[in-house]
Image (spheres, helix red, strand yellow):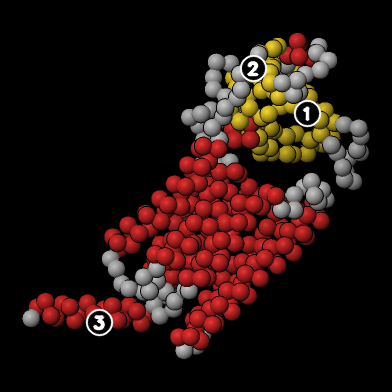
Amino acid sequence: MTDTVTTQLDAIHSMLAAGHRSLRIERHSLILWGVTGGALFLFGDYILTPDQIPVVEQRAVAWLVFLTTVLGGVGVVDWFLTRRTKQKRDRAWSFVHRQILKVWWLLLALGTLLDFGMFFFGGRYMLIATWLVLAGVGLYVHGLFSEELLEWVGALMIAIAVGTLAFQLNPQTSKLIAASVFGVGLPLLAVMLDRGNAHSAWRRLRQAMLWLLCVLGLPLSVDRYANAVTVPEAPVVSLETFLHRSSVSGPQIVSIPAGTKIPVKVGISGDLFRGGPETVWPLVLANPIEAMMVDGQLTGEFRFAGEDWLRARDRLRIRIPSLKAQLTPEEGPVVRTSLIAKVLRKNER
């Protein structure tokens, strides 16, 4: 008798839970948005590049039109497919579903406008994390009225976004992770959906951890393989010897001693300062380094004496944390700034 009562109570509980979470997200929606988002992150560097559109304002407008067209097109396709699916099931659009759809479109519009604004106001290093947070919020809100797994995955997407900023991942690694979260994670989530069945928190936790393992394992493995720094065997020449050569061909390693003056040439434009041929900041190298070159061109790999090779785009961090103008009787008008240039070693992130 006790087992029968328990079974009946569990059935009533499942029925009530299904009644409260009556909204269903269609699998094709997750696949459509996942593939689209993954492709944009994966191939975004080859679309509307600075070489194609050098003017920042024009490139910003081009990206705004491009994102609006792509996301709008995918949204229309998703809407028609969802409507057809509901017609086959003989079900109408619920009020809650329409409101959730409005929230999703609001988040997409917000992300597009933030992408546009960052061209002018900076902060594009946060763009990937911003899109992950917006998508995570959309899934979490959807999960409040639908399947619990959507809430878990939405919260994990927000956590991944925070992690990319907290660990200061380089842009390439962040893009691979974002492409995997969308391109792999959302289609995988579509497969994992169980149509509103009630499960324990432990089972949801296991599902979420499995999803997280699949989503992060692939991009981090690819990134580790792609970022393995290998340089060809090459002779080491001093900077003085290199400067006296009339022509350079093939690979070679140039040793640059500490104390070498490295001029930073800055182009000045705008209506505040007068532009000239070039403005030079004379910086002095603090430690000796060896730079890899092929046919007279820097490849981006370098190393400190006796250490492993590093790739500049992955390990070099440059920040200008302060910029302040002053006017004093002693010095007159002066602008003070600070520049932080740091190289992350192999054991640093």
Q: Quadrant of residue 321?
A: top right
Answer few, some or many: residues within 10 Å of disc 1's Cα (few below 14, many 20 plus, some between 14 and 19): few
Residue positioned 50% across, 37% down in the render = 224
Q: Is residue 343 above or below residue 103?
A: above
Depth check: give the residue in front, 119 or 239.
239
Question: Residue visible at 63% across and 31% down?
Answer: 312
Q: Amino acid at mark 3?
A: Ile
Tell me which residue sits at (76%, 14%) in the image.
242
Assign the N terminus to one quadrant of the image: bottom left
Residue 264, which numbered label?
1
Relative height, residue 79 to residue 128 (above, below): below
What amino acid is at disc 1? Val
Residue 191 drawn at (x, y percent): 42, 65
Q: Which residue is mark 3?
A: 12
- Can you name the residue that lies furthest to the left here? 1
Mark on residue 234?
2
Give the number of marks: 3
Measure how far apart labels 3 and 1 are at the Cα level: 72 Å
Q: Are marks 2 and 3 in contact (CB under 8 Å)?
A: no
Q: Position of residue 19 (x, y in %)?
A: 36, 82
Query: At numbered mark 1, what does the secondary structure look like: helix, strand or loop?
Result: strand
Compared to residue 240, the image places residue 50 above or below, namely: below
